[in-house]
């Protein structure tokens, strides 16, 4: 056993020796630094191969040889329904599902379906950058309130949220678990959001793409629509197998919309614009939800160890600070102390020059922060953290 083996989950290997070489591949994440000695830790995909059952099913489907049009089939929808009941204790019905080729499309469709030009669309910042652009795509106004770090956790600013919503909001775009701050919002927070949605008569669009990646076992993911029928009625929940099982390029996602009228509005907003999910994505989704729970469990062991490595290493460095990641494989790092102490204006460039490629907090609405993707073999993470340590202390 190496120091990185995960004991009970040792059937699955997430170490460097078992990770495919991505340099020189089609990967956006790796191509950015082609020919440079920079470890890419930006775009949110992982450096691990997808689970073997998914690879086997895709290979069998390719061997069939015919790629005609396909639609989601009952066994696929049953796998999703059962997977969500098993993993998140939420009983949905197959007819609530609407399939889309990706989450960014899915939340843009939500804006299109639920607003008119000039309406307000709310989200809390910092946030995954396409949230910030979606309202403008439909001539809506982006309304924001900042999440705030209190001690070792990012928290809602309820007064600011309430004030922003009062400015003509029609849609509440929630990200839970949250990219980039890594929070899994608790029942109390979700109930508060549901109350605000009720008070302002809002639709909630809840992006739950990271719900399979909860690292803090004391904070299970709770879909906001699972709070009860009243909130479910006004909610569009978005999920996908893409982050958890590392198949984002298969472009398969789904909206869960219990209310028939809202579902019809949503489908109408897709008409003629949003293509169907490709058959390989549908197959990957069925197998992921049905057969890949053991792989996920082993992955989470690796990500938990990686998260600890990041927390310990970063918080040992002067001028940097990060908070415990409750979910996702993304660490949100405050560099403002380092920038002030060293006169650094661009922390992304500073760490790139040290050989580590991070995402810029500016794109998420919070300059002075960087996001580090630790969905990689522990050895590669250790090397990147060592480069950051040397750059900061050097
Ligand atoms: C919160 C969130 N939503 C959506 C996406 C992207 O989803 P897709 O690639 O299916 O459009 C990401 C990717 O990082 C994400 O973090």
Image (cartoon, helix red, strand yellow):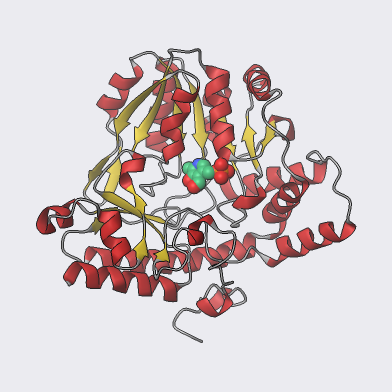
Nearer to me, 204 or 15: 15
Can you name the residue that lies furthest to the left here? 341
Residue 8 visible, this orientation: yes
Instruction: Locate residue 144, reporting x and y percent.
Output: 33, 28
Residue visible at 58% across and 34% down? 105
Can you name the residue that lies furthest to the bottom here? 1
* Residue 238 horizontal side relative to residue 148, left or right: right
* Residue 337 horizontal side relative to residue 142, left or right: left
Would you place residue 66 above or below residue 320 in this image? above
Q: On the image, which quarter does residue 230 sit in?
A: top right
Placement of the C terminus among the 4 image quadrants: bottom left
Instruction: Locate residue 73, reporting x and y percent.
Output: 81, 41
Instruction: Locate residue 379, reporting x and y percent.
Output: 43, 76
Q: On the image, which quarter does residue 373 sit in?
A: bottom left
Would you place residue 210 above or below residue 170 in this image? below
Residue visible at 53% across and 68% down? 23
* Residue 54 horizontal side relative to residue 233, left or right: right
Residue 237 visible, this orientation: no
Instruction: Locate residue 323, reporting x and y percent.
Output: 29, 54
Nearer to me, 6 or 247: 247
All told, the count of numbered labels is: 0
* Residue 98 horizontal side relative to residue 308, left or right: right
Would you place residue 94 above or below residue 59 in this image? above
Q: On the image, which quarter does residue 195 sit in?
A: top left
């Amino acid at each position: 056993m190496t120091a990185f083996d995960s004991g009970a989950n040792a059937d699955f290997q997430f170490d460097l020796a078992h990770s495919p070489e991505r340099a020189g591949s089609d990967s956006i994440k790796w191509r950015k630094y082609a020919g440079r000695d920079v470890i890419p830790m930006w775009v949110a995909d992982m450096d691990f191969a997808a689970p073997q059952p998914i690879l086997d099913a895709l290979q069998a489907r390719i061997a069939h040889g015919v790629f005609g049009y396909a639609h989601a089939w009952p066994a696929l929808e049953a796998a999703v329904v059962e997977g969500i009941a098993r993993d998140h204790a939420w009983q949905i019905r197959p007819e609530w599902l609407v399939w889309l080729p990706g989450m960014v499309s899915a939340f843009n469709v939500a804006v299109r379906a639920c607003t008119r030009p000039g309406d307000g669309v709310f989200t809390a910042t910092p946030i995954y950058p396409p949230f910030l652009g979606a309202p403008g795509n439909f001539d809506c106004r982006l309304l924001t309130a900042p999440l705030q770090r209190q001690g070792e956790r990012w928290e809602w600013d309820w007064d600011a949220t309430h004030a922003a919503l009062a400015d003509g909001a029609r849609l509440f775009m929630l990200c839970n678990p949250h990219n980039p701050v890594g929070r899994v919002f608790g029942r109390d927070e979700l109930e508060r959001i549901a109350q605000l949605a009720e008070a302002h008569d809002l639709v909630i669009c809840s992006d739950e793409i990271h719900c399979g990646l909860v690292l803090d076992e004391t904070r299970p993911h709770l879909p906001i629509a699972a709070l009860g029928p009243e909130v479910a009625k006004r909610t569009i929940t978005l999920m996908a197998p893409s982050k958890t099982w590392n198949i984002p390029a298969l472009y398969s996602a789904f909206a869960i919309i219990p209310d028939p009228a809202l579902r019809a509005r949503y489908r109408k907003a897709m008409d003629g614009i949003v293509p169907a999910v490709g058959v390989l994505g549908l197959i990957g989704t069925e197998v992921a939800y049905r057969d890949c729970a053991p792989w996920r469990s082993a992955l989470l062991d690796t990500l938990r160890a990686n998260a600890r490595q990041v927390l310990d290493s970063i918080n040992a460095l002067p001028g940097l600070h990060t908070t415990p990641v409750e979910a996702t494989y993304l660490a949100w790092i405050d560099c403002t102390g380092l920038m002030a102490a060293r006169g650094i204006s661009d922390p992304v460039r500073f760490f790139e020059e040290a050989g580590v490629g991070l995402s810029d907090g500016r794109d998420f609405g919070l300059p002075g922060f960087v996001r580090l993707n630790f969905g990689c073999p522990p050895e590669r993470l250790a090397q990147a953290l060592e480069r950051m340590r040397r750059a900061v202390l050097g």
